[in-house]
Image (cartoon, rainbow, N blue to C red):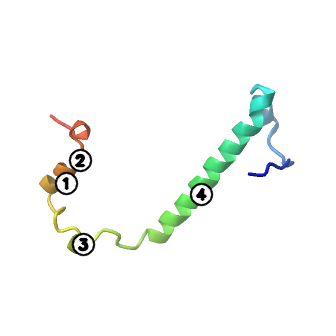
Amino acid sequence: MAVVKATFTIPEELLKRLEKVPAGKRSLLVAKAIKRELDRKSLAEDLKKLKHRTVWKEKDHPDLVSPDDFSRYRPAKSRVTG
């Protein structure tokens, strides 16, 4: 992947916090943060598009109708016991 230099404006207090990160790791930190936020926004938009759509149809999953059906597919250690 090509790497380019970018210039942008951020709040002063955020820059002060960023300057505490070692110089060789700042760009990686900023790139990861930007990617995470852009991925989150993209996912949120995708979920909004699906908001009023039925994605689960019982006719497509006749083996997963009751709670007992689901418990067979859930790993035992994730089950809540009580």
Which residue lies under the disc numbered 1?
Answer: 70
Q: Residues within 10 Å of mark 1 (few under 14, many from 20)?
A: few
Give the foreground label among 3 and 4.
3
Name which residue type carries label 3. Answer: Asp
* Point 24% across, 72% down: residue: 60
The answer to which image quadrant residue 75 occupies is top left
Dot placed on the residue nearer the N-terminal end, 1 or 4: 4
Q: Split into 4 quadrants, where in the image is the C terminus?
A: top left
* Left or right of 40, for residue 13: right
Q: Amino acid at mark 4?
A: Lys
Lower position in the chain sequence, tag 3 or tag 4:
4
Residue depicted at x 44% and y 69%: 50
User: Whole-Å distance between the Cαs marked 1 and 4?
Assistant: 31 Å
Say which residue label 4 marks. 41
Q: Which residue is mark 3?
A: 60
Crowdedness of circle 3 by 10 Å Cα count: few (<14), some, many (20+)?
few
- Circle 2/circle 1 CB separation < 8 Å: yes
Residue at horizontal 15%, vertical 56%? 69
Element under disc 3: helix
Vertical relation: 80 (above or below) 20: below
Residue at image position (58%, 60%) is: 42
In what element is the residue under mark 4?
helix
